[in-house]
Structures are given as C-alpha cells and as structure tokens.
Image: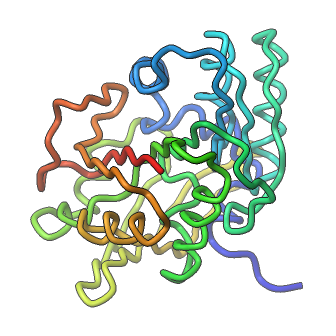
Amino acid sequence: MSKKQWYEALFENYGEKYDGECFTQGTMGECDFLEKEFGHDKSLKILDIGCGTGRHDIELAKRGYSVTGIDLSDSQLERAEKKASEAGVKVKFMQHDARNLPFRDEFHVAIMLCEGGFPLMETDEMNFEILKSAANSLKTGGKFIFTTLNGLFPLYHSVEEFCDNEKGEGNATYRSNTFDLMTFRDHNITEFTDDLGNKKTLDCNERYYVPSEITWLLKTLGFSKIEIFGAKLGAFSRNDKLTTEDFEMLVVAQK
C-alpha cells in the first residue's frame, strides 16, 4: 500500500480536534455570506467539496438548504454524521476524492471553504483536477464559492509567524516554513495531537495562488464571471478588496 499523503494522514482521527482549531470558528458568519450569495433560495442544490466535519453543511441544513458534503477522510465524515444527527438535520455525506467527483450538471452551487482539498494536493495538475471536478458538478449558470491561500501574502509576510500568532492553546503548530518563490509552495512541519491523544509530526506543503492564476484557471473551465475578495474568518464580504494582508482569498465564480 502506498504511503499516505500528508493531508490524508492529517485528517485521520482528527475530527474533534479539528473543530477546536482557530480557523474553524467562523461558521455562522460564513453561512450568512453564503445565504446572501444563494439569494436565500432554499430550492438550490448545494455541494460542499472537502466538507470536513460538516460545519457549513449542518448550519445550512438548519437554515433549510439541501446540502451534499463530500470528503476523503473517514474520520471527518464520521464526525460530520454524528454532529448532523445531534443537530437533528439531514445532510447527505459521501466519501469521494475531490479530484474525481462523479457528479455532472447536478448542483446549483458548489462551495469549498477553508482549503477543502484545493490547494493541498502535491501537484498543480491535481489541484486543477479539483477545480475541474467542481466545474463539472455544476449546472449551467451555477456558482462556485471557495477560499484558497493568497499568494500575495507570503511575498510580504512570514507564514510561520502568521500561523503562530493565530493558533490557540492546544491547536496544531506549524514550524520551519519555507516559501518557494519558483513554485509558490510553502513547506512546513505541522505538529498536533489527534483525537486519540497521539502526537503527530507531518511534512506538509501547500500551494499559494495569485489572483491572476485563479482567474485564468477558472476561465479555462468555462466560468464567465470571476470575482476575488479578501477572506476574513467568519466575516466574508464583497466589500473586502484582496490585499497583501489577506492570508486567504475568497473567490466567487459563475458558469
């Protein structure tokens, strides 16, 4: 059996701890933004790519939306199912690889928040396959809303310092970051304790994207309208122009 990639190993037995991480605390505000983008239309079919523990799906289901959440991780999906059951809502959770989704022209909206697979893949081609899968899943006129790492940020800031400042007590730590200007990949060592109390150390690498790259990639996939904003945790807004201060960018694209 081939060695697991870092993003596969990271999400094993990490469902509960994941929900406590600082970057998962903006669910309500993010769903408020999504609802505005949906036009509060409860008839829409929504796909969440890389849904993790289902935090956006469950909140949207509480608000009356029909959501399908897909993820690669067993333990994340198990936690999502448990949380949905406890919340008394129905969400369709399925295990799929975001690079190869089985859906064709099925959904009105696809969301992919907090790096739901993209841009964690080991090659640019694999990351592109995720965008392509999302595009294929959408109906004509469908909307794709996602966040990704902002390549403008590491040109002006230390990623390691940013992650260190953002983390809370007991959260994962990121060290020895090296940002490669030729590939726009950040290589780091992530240390965390999983739900079973096991301490883990992983060599990770993530791809940062600049706005012009994202625009070009989405245009090649048939998206006609592409808008990019700064992504503020729990407070997404069309009023936030993307700057070098934003660690993530928020992308809204329409087919």
Compared to residue 169, the image places residue 123 above or below, namely below
Q: Is residue 22 left or right of residue 166?
A: right
Nearest the camera: 95 or 19?
A: 95
Residue 15 rendering spot, x and y as whole percentages = 70, 40
Residue 121 rendering spot, x and y as whole percentages = 56, 73
The quarter of the rendered structure image containing the N terminus is bottom right
Examine the rendering and report whether any part of residue 103 can be seen: yes
Q: Which of the 4 image quadrants contains residue 19?
A: top right
Examine the rendering and report whether any part of residue 26 can be seen: no
Q: Residue at x 82, y 19 (%)?
A: 90
Q: Residue at x 35, y 58 (%)?
A: 149
Q: Is residue 64 left or right of residue 206?
A: right
Nearest the camera: 190 or 125?
A: 125
Residue 117 rendering spot, x and y as whole percentages = 58, 59
Residue 219 rendering spot, x and y as whole percentages = 39, 66
Nearest the camera: 205 or 98?
A: 98
Q: Residue at x 40, y 19 (%)?
A: 36
Compared to residue 134, the image places residue 209 above or below, namely below
Q: Residue furthest right?
A: 1
Q: How many marks?
A: 0
Q: Residue at x 31, y 79 (%)?
A: 184
Q: Which of the 4 image quadrants contains residue 5?
A: bottom right
